[in-house]
Image (cartoon, grey):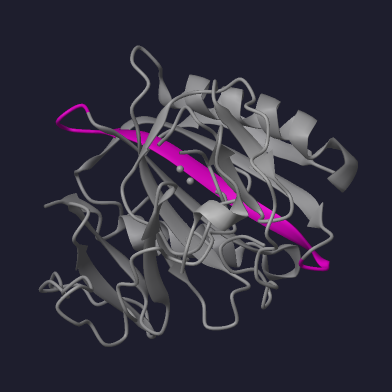
């Protein structure tokens, strides 16, 4: 993942030559994770040295991302996979009350969403379901939807590195995190090829992989658990949807992922 590294101060993945001060305003997702328990705001710091990784292109963001890779244009923490997005340089407003710059809700399918969720058509070119009171933000790490207390987030971004698979993308991300978060108790819970979750839309194909990991965040003062799902859509685009939150809430992160993908579509 060339050119990207994990910044514990801002709790997000960053590209070479950028730092917490480079992002104004998730943000995320996305979003210490774009929004971990009210995670304290990022502290100003100088540009960190580049670390190997993959090139990522962002879709939109919720807070600055913190633990995510460059191979995806990001977790989270993303681009890189980031889970602690920084303030959005281009505020887009709250998802609960869309404005001209916020994503507009799209008609829901006949089956109802769980209570507390709504479907949005994000201006980044995709639709998905998110908690109705979460705020949206956009950054180089992608698009973030963050909880009011900033303890949880959903981050969406595209994987632009050529000739890579969802599994390889996540493998590279985990290898990078194991080094950057070695002193923070990084633990890879699982990494495997998988298929679209039950209830996911047809846009989400079975060419997918999932990475589950946890780490201690000194900045947030809590241990975070993340599920990072990478997949290929029917038109060949690769996306990553990362859901982060306090480890004590697991497996709520997995439930949020399934709900988000139940409305995922390309606009």
Q: Is residue 119 above or below residue 162?
A: below
Q: Position of residue 77 (x, y in %)?
A: 57, 51
Q: Is residue 73 above or below residue 3?
A: below
Query: Quadrant location of residue 131?
Result: bottom left
203, 44: nearer the viewer = 44
Q: Residue at x 61, y 20 (%)?
A: 52
- Report whether 208 appears left or right of 52: left
The question of residue 28 being in magenta is answered with no
- Report whether 92 appears left or right of 224: left
- Quick check: can you spot residue 223? yes
The question of residue 229 being in magenta is answered with yes
- Quick check: can you spot residue 197? no
Predominant SS of the magenta segment: strand
Q: Position of residue 13 (x, y in %)?
A: 58, 43
Query: Hey, which residue is sitting farthest top in the picture?
Result: 163
Q: Position of residue 130 (x, y in %)?
A: 36, 70
Q: Residue at x 20, y 26 (%)?
A: 236
Q: Position of residue 110 (x, y in %)?
A: 13, 73
263, 159: nearer the viewer = 159
Q: Quadrant of the N terminus?
A: top right
Q: Is residue 30 above or below residue 58?
A: below
- Report whether 155 appears left or right of 172: left
Q: Residue at x 47, y 42 (%)?
A: 229
Magenta stretch: give its range: 220-236
Q: Is residue 153 above or below residue 82?
A: below
- Numbered disc total: 0
């Amino acid at each position: 993942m060339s050119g990207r590294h994990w910044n514990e101060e801002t709790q997000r993945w960053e590209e070479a030559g950028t730092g917490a001060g480079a992002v104004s305003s998730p943000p995320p997702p996305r979003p210490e994770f774009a929004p971990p328990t009210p995670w304290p705001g990022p502290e100003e710091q100088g540009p960190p040295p580049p670390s190997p990784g993959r090139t990522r292109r962002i879709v939109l963001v919720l807070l600055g991302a913190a633990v995510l890779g460059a191979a995806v244009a990001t977790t989270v923490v993303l681009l890189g996979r980031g889970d602690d997005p920084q303030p959005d340089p281009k505020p887009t407003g709250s998802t609960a009350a869309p404005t001209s710059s916020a994503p507009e809700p799209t008609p829901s399918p006949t089956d109802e969403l769980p209570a507390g969720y709504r479907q949005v058509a994000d201006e980044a070119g995709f639709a998905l379901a998110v908690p109705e009171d979460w705020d949206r933000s956009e950054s180089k790490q992608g698009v973030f939807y963050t909880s009011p207390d900033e303890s949880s987030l959903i981050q969406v971004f595209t994987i632009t590195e050529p000739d890579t698979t969802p599994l390889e993308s996540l493998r590279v991300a985990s290898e990078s995190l194991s080094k950057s978060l070695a002193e923070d108790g990084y633990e890879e819970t699982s990494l495997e090829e998988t298929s679209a979750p039950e209830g996911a839309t047809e846009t989400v194909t079975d060419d997918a992989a999932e990475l589950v990991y946890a780490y201690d965040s000194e900045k947030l003062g809590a241990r975070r658990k993340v599920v990072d799902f990478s997949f290929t859509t029917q038109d060949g685009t690769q996306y990553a949807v990362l859901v982060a939150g306090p480890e004590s809430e697991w497996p709520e992160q997995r439930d949020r992922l399934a709900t988000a993908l139940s409305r995922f579509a390309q606009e």
